[in-house]
Image (cartoon, helix red, strand yellow):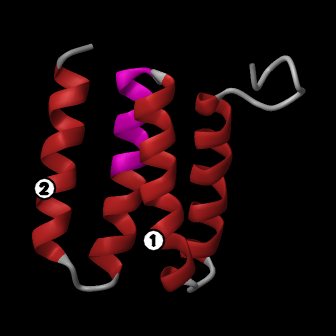
Amino acid sequence: ELLKRGGAPLTERGITMHELACGLRDNGRWDEAEPLFREALRLAEEGGATAKSRAITLRSYARGLRANGKAQEVARLEAQADKLEADT
């Protein structure tokens, strides 16, 4: 339905969110980047993105968390990414 109206599929929207989040993270705007990483992951899951693609987003998100002192969350995300990569 969305494609018929000219919208992008969920996976493409997830990739766009991922790229926006990385740009914000890399420019010191973590408070804005973090929710976009979460949205990118949601879109990737709902859109059926590949395991490799989801792992990349998880690792990018973890990088931002690490830089902002959230080590416990980093370990959880990296474990999820490891599992996704092992399943491919």
Mark 2 residue crowding within 10 angstroms, few (<14) / some (14–19) / many (20+): few
Report crowding for label 1: few under 14, some 14 to 19, many 20 or more residues within 10 A (C-alpha): some
Residue drawn 59% across the image and 30% down it: 11
Quarter placement of the C terminus = top left
Quadrant into which the N terminus falls: top right
Q: Residue furthest right?
A: 6
* Left or right: where 87 falls relative to 65: left
Magenta residues span 50-58
28 relative to 76 in the view: left or right: right
Amino acid of disc 2? Arg
Residue 37 percent across, percent down from the top left:
47, 59
The amino acid sitting under disc 1 is Glu
User: At which x and y percent is residue 77?
Assistant: 21, 53
Query: Mark 2: which secondary structure?
Result: helix
Which numbered disc flags the more N-terminal residue, 2 or 1? Answer: 1
Mark 1 sits on what residue?
34
Q: Where residue 10 is drawn, which disc sits there?
A: none
* Residue 53 part of the magenta segment: yes
- Does dot 1 land on a helix, a strand or a loop? helix
Left or right of 17: which side holds 38? Answer: left
Distance (Cα) linking label 2 and label 1: 15 Å
Percent across and percent down for residue 63 are 36, 65
Residue 34, position in %: x, y? 45, 71
**Residue that numbered label 2 is attached to:** 76
Residue that appears at 45% across and 30% down: 46
Q: Quadrant of residue 69?
A: bottom left
What secondary structure characterizes most of the magenta part?
helix
Q: Give whichever of 42, 72 is nearer the camera.
A: 42
User: So how many labels did they put on this image?
Assistant: 2
Residue sitting at x 61%, y 32%: 10
